């Protein structure tokens, strides 16, 4: 807190503009940025080391190079300005593009980390080019220009293992592992939620609709059933498996995806009942149900390797049974 107060008095709440920085302050910002990049890439490497060794090695090498850049900058600062380096970072300065390295990527995927590293390196290269053009000191300008070139090379390195590069055996394993994680952590809980929301809420929604012939009553029942099912499914998914043994990832993410897709599946055929005309609303709701069931079948075929005819037949049969039961109960 005390350091933040000092920095605010030195640079103001909005920060100094890049054009107003001295050579010493430019070097200080560069040093701080290289420290942040080193920490970020080291963290990326640690998170990826077990499942993505190829990409982890790349980040380890990048971290070592950023540490060397930091050493070069500190040596230059000592030579020109002495031992006391100003406490200023890119966050204190307006006019510097930033990609916060501590915001380590929502899903912790290797692909997302590579994309973030690319952006960080592009910003660093742009900063060094700008900084080199502003200083009149030949040795500082030469160092900043060399670092701009080095960061551009890093940007290419961060992208050298992508879908357009001929894959190595290790990269093939990484791609397969990433696909499995995506299916286990996102597709599977999402599909479970969508199936539950789309199918299980059919009975209460259509039972209420045919029992009352009132669109608003059906809408209220559908909303209650959808939200209730979403909360229930979200907690059930999150509490059923902590992901440590199964490899299905964080339970909070799976629970959120499952709950959200459950609500979406139920609300889809509930929203038409905002239309006052009962038969019009019911006809549109029926079309939405058909679309929902086809979407479920497509996901099963696309990600779960279920034969398309089998997927459609099973989903349609289950949906038809639940829909018929709802209408039967409503007319009872």
Image: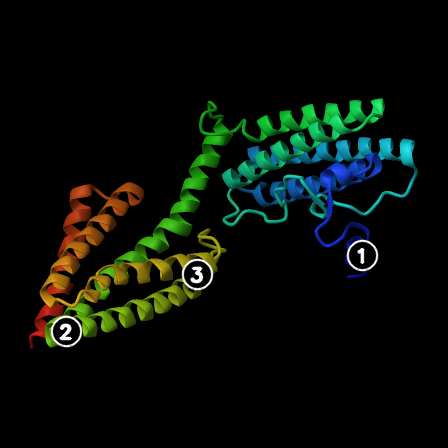
For the residue labelled by badge 2, is the local secondary structure a helix, a strand or a loop? loop
Q: Are marks 3 and 1 in contact (CB under 8 Å)?
A: no
Q: Quadrant of the C terminus?
A: bottom left
Rendered residue at 55%/40% (across/down): 113
For label 3, the residue is 241
- Viewer-proximal residue among 160 and 29: 29
The quarter holding residue 239 reads bottom left
For label 1, the residue is 3
Q: Give x and y (percent) for residue 155.
A: 60, 29
Q: Which mark is on residue 288?
A: none
The quarter holding residue 124 reads top right
Q: Which mark is on residue 214?
A: 2
Query: Vertical placement of 119 versus 232: above or below?
Result: above
- Viewer-proximal residue among 251 and 122: 122
**Neighbours of disc 1 within 10 Å: few (<14), some (14-19), many (20+):** few
Query: Vertical placement of 176 versus 260: above or below?
Result: above
Q: Give x and y (percent) for residue 49.
A: 59, 41
Query: Vertical placement of 160 versus 5: above or below?
Result: above
Sooner in the amino-acid sequence: mark 3 or mark 2:
2
Q: Give x and y (percent) for residue 175.
A: 45, 35
For the residue labelled by badge 1, is the local secondary structure a helix, a strand or a loop? helix
Rendered residue at 33%/68% (across/down): 227
């Amino acid at each position: 807190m005390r350091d933040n107060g000092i920095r605010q008095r030195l640079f103001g709440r909005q920060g100094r503009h890049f054009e107003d920085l001295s050579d010493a302050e430019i070097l200080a910002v560069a040093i701080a940025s290289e420290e942040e990049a080193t920490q970020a890439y080291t963290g990326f490497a640690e998170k990826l080391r077990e499942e993505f060794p190829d990409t982890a090695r790349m980040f380890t090498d990048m971290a070592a190079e950023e540490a060397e850049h930091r050493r070069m900058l500190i040596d230059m600062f000592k030579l020109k300005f002495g031992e006391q380096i100003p406490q200023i970072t890119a966050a204190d300065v307006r006019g510097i593009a930033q990609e916060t390295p501590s915001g380590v990527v929502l899903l912790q995927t290797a692909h997302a980390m590579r994309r973030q590293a690319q952006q960080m390196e592009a910003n660093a290269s742009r900063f060094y080019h700008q900084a080199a053009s502003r200083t009149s000191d030949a040795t500082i300008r030469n160092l900043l220009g060399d670092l701009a070139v080095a960061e551009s090379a890093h940007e290419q390195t961060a992208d050298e293992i992508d879908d357009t590069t001929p894959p190595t055996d290790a990269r093939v394993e990484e791609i397969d592992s990433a696909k499995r994680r995506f299916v286990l952590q996102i597709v599977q809980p999402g599909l479970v939620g969508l199936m539950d929301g789309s199918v299980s809420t059919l009975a209460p929604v259509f039972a209420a609709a045919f029992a009352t012939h009132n669109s608003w009553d059906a809408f209220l029942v559908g909303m209650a059933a959808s939200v209730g099912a979403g909360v229930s499914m979200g907690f059930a998914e999150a509490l059923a498996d902590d992901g440590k043994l199964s490899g299905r990832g964080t339970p909070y993410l799976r629970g959120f995806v499952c709950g959200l897709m459950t609500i979406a599946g139920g609300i889809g055929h509930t929203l038409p009942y905002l239309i006052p005309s009962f038969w019009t609303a019911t006809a549109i709701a029926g079309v939405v149900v058909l679309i929902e069931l086809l979407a479920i079948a497509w996901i099963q075929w696309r990600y779960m390797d279920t034969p398309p005819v089998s997927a459609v037949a099973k989903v349609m049969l289950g949906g038809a049974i639940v829909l018929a039961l709802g209408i039967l109960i409503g007319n009872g």
